[in-house]
Image (spheres, rainbow, N blue to C red):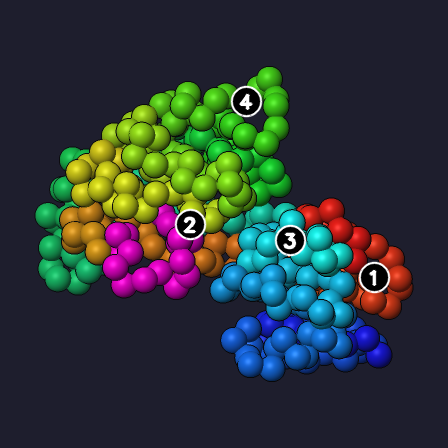
Amino acid sequence: MPDVICLRPLEDFANVGVVPPRALTIRAMEPESQELAEAMRSAEALVIPAVGPALETELFAGSAIRLVQVTGAGVDRVDGAALAGLGVAVAGIPGRSAPAVAEYVVATAVALMRFLPGTTAAILAGDYMNVRDRMIRCGLNQLAGLTVGVVGYGIIGRATAKQCAALGAEVVFCDPAIDREDGVVLGELLATADIVTLHVPLQDVTRGMIGAAEIGLMKPDAILVNAARGGIVDEAALADALEAGRIGGAAVDVYSSEPPAPDNPLLTVSAAAAQRLILTPHIAGVTRQAWASLFADAWDNVARVLLQGEPPRNVTNGATG
């Protein structure tokens, strides 16, 4: 039976009712395991979560790995171009988490527009009337009638746009990877949107694409949601903008390193700035339903290659395995 190394705990699959193909010999390992490189010399596929430490290309030199199957959309844990040179295909599962991510964007944006972070603590502290008066004075908003700017118009970006439009928002979008007449340039989107939500992959062209200059183009009460990748946003610039009141609020699900270091600028903001900040641990696309779909598709792709002799689907680096 073909050997597969899985860097995701096998109970993750069982917890959502997904059973890996029984015709495969699957070995669960930790990415930091000293035995990983040796095990890869005989394994033909490597199954990995989308989130985690980078895997060095040197691990694959002399290995039997033909396919790196990511159980998610993001494939930035490996150097796809370098692996293509070794004949290793890298495949992701695009779009399956789109409904979950879209819901996260709507939920966090609405929470920030209604100034919900911190209200429970205030009411428990007996500050009911004061916090209510402050919220009303600041001006509570609803999504209907506002403009949502979607940066990155792939499957997840379009799903987010659809949910926002269904709630009455006007949607504008830009995407550096596609040329559509109905899109706008990034500067125009940032200047006009009440909510800016990011859905681009982390690539050289998108790394640091939202920095101090771009945040400076946004409305002073605008909200930024990043459920894409941490390196897309300059975290220090975002923290500075929150402290200075140059942005209305932010929801951040992803970080330049994960878990974020204790000195990450977003983890050291003042209590006042934290009232306009929602931090979550890379869970925007994590629901039971999304995981069940992602995991089933991932194992189907592994079986397609190792058991059926077919080329993998959703390859991101041009290799065929």
Q: Can the viewer see residue 25?
A: yes
Question: Which mark sits nearer the N-terminus, 4 or 2?
Answer: 4
User: Which of pointers 3 and 1 indicates the residue nearer the eye?
Assistant: 3
Q: Compared to 40, does 101 lie above or below?
A: above
Which sits in the foreground, 95 or 126?
Answer: 95
Q: Secondary structure at mark 4?
A: loop
Secondary element type, mark 1: helix
Residue position marked by numbered label 3 in the rendering: 82
Tag of residue 230: 2
Q: Which amino acid, mark 3?
A: Ala
Q: Which mark is residue 183?
A: 4
Instruction: Between residue 155 and residue 213, name the one nearer to us.
Output: 213
Give the residue type at disc 4.
Gly
Is residue 236 rendered to the left or right of residue 188? Answer: left
Task: Assign the magenta stretch its main secondary structure.
Answer: loop
Q: Is residue 201 magenta?
A: no
Q: Nearer the viewer, mark 4 or mark 2?
A: 2
